[in-house]
Amino acid sequence: MNDRPAAGVRVDEARLTSLVEQLGRVGAQSSGGIIRPLYSPPWREAQDMVATMMSDAGLSVREDAVGNVFGRLAGDTAGPVLLTGSHIDTVVHGGAYDGALGVLSAIVALEACAAAGGTPRRTVEVVSLCEEESSRFHANYFGTRSILGLVAENEPELLVDPDGVTLAEAARSVGLDPARFSDARRDDIDTFLELHIEQGRTLVDAAIDVGVVDVITGFMWLEVVVDGRTDHAGATAMTNRQDALQAAARMITAVEGVALAEGHPAVATTGVVRVHPGGANIVPGRVEFTIDVRHPELDVLDQMVAAMREQCAAVATDRGVQVDLQVVKKTPPHTLDAGLRAVLQQAADTCGLTWRELPSGAGHDSQTMGTHVKAAMLFVPSVDGRSHSPAEYSTPHDCAQGASVLATAVRLLAWAPPQSDQQ
């Protein structure tokens, strides 16, 4: 890999590293990882810190009605905004790079572009999106959907966290007014660029500097409830049981089998299992578990979920239990804008860096943003492919190279004269 970009707009590696370390301390746990869910005190602290970072970079800062934070560098002509950034909320015990690196890279990228001289032809903004992970509510890209006007009026009162707190109540606790959420909608954005860690090992294994995402996978979250019968663990014969946990275990294995049979890049994961009543000497009467299933082709994704329904129903019949499977979140695959992908590739070439196109196995804000505006994504390598884990890490060198490509792309898009002036 190259030591540094040969040309293009270069960001300050030490400054970017410092910003990552500062933000990474907000919500950090003594047991490892970060817990920074939407509308929590650490979330509020993080957004306030990002706002200060944007201001220090010379950007005009504002927070919208749902808590998205924007840093603006005004252009000298009227027209649609080029937006770049990502999110600052985390999964439980997540890492310091997922989402956050995209926000901080965008800040240093705009700072570097401004330092390179001249006023941008078009207005550029950095955004620190309020939510992406659905780690507290099934909010489904709440920050992006708010910008696009896709949040239903009653949604803040309907979304409830595991402690019974509604999204509306949580918003009020950090000084936001749910009655004004619709004010977050914007119609002045036509381009979105998002830098992100890869969260896989394609780039690191191939020793490629950056990745240009061609398609973002589609996924569904399913919640499954298995109802059997609670009985005494010692007095109930094995042949007389309706053990919900044994049935659920077979269903979970069958779900994995569907993904294995489909083959790469199909994946399916059960990350949550709740057993009721949860006594060591009680045959479980109810089990709730989740399924996360993903594939970059919508037809295949739907077929996989249908097969999982059939497998779970067959197990339920065989084991004498009832099963209910509900889809609680569905995001279709999205192919990113070809023209913007070409700009990112040009920027990587200008910086003297190697690149390749690759799909994203994780969902991102670009997936939703791209349904309404042109969107593209840039990946930087993840060491050992780790993410959604305290072990998540991307080297300062790789982060700075990615941010330099982002800065160069922004410069090409916002400072270059319009195409008609070049002819």
Image (cartoon, rainbow, N blue to C red):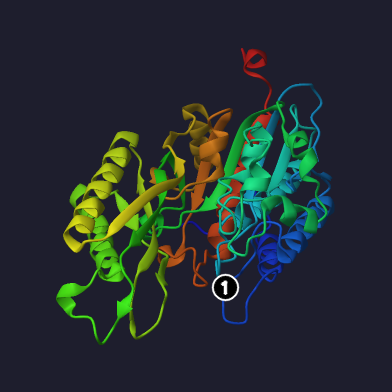
Whole-percent x, y for residue 62 in the image: 83, 44
Which residue is at the front of the view, 299 or 55?
299
The correct choice, above or below, for 96 with respect to 309 in the image is below
Quarter of the figure with the C terminus: top right
Number of labels in the image equals 1
Does 302 sit left or right of 215 as displayed? left
Q: Is residue 275 above or below residue 16?
A: below
Tell me which corner region of the image, top left, top right, bottom left or bottom right, holds residue 237.
bottom left
Q: Quadrant of the N terminus?
A: bottom left
- Residue 407 can be seen in this image: no
Q: On the picture, is 237 further left or further right than 84?
A: left
Residue 223, image x and y in percent?
41, 54
- Residue at screen point 33% across, 60% down: 226
Image: 58 above or below 98? above
Secondary structure of the residue carrying numbered label 1: loop
Of 43 and 242, nearer the camera is: 242
Percent across and percent down for residue 170 are: 72, 56
- Can you identify the residue that label 1 sits on? 33
Any part of residue 267 in sight:
yes
Say which amino acid is labelled 1: Gly
Rendered location of residue 234, percent (x, y): 26, 87
Please name the residue shown 77% across and 63% down the image: 45
Q: Is 279 above or below relative to 284?
A: below
Which of the two residues, 389 or 206, is positioned nearer the viewer here?
A: 389
How would you rate the neighbour count of disc 1 (Cα within 10 Å): few for under 14, some for 14-19, many for 20 or more? many
Going 74% across and 45% down the picture, which residue do you hit?
Answer: 66
Work out whether residue 95 or residue 243 is closer to the camera in this orientation and state it: 243
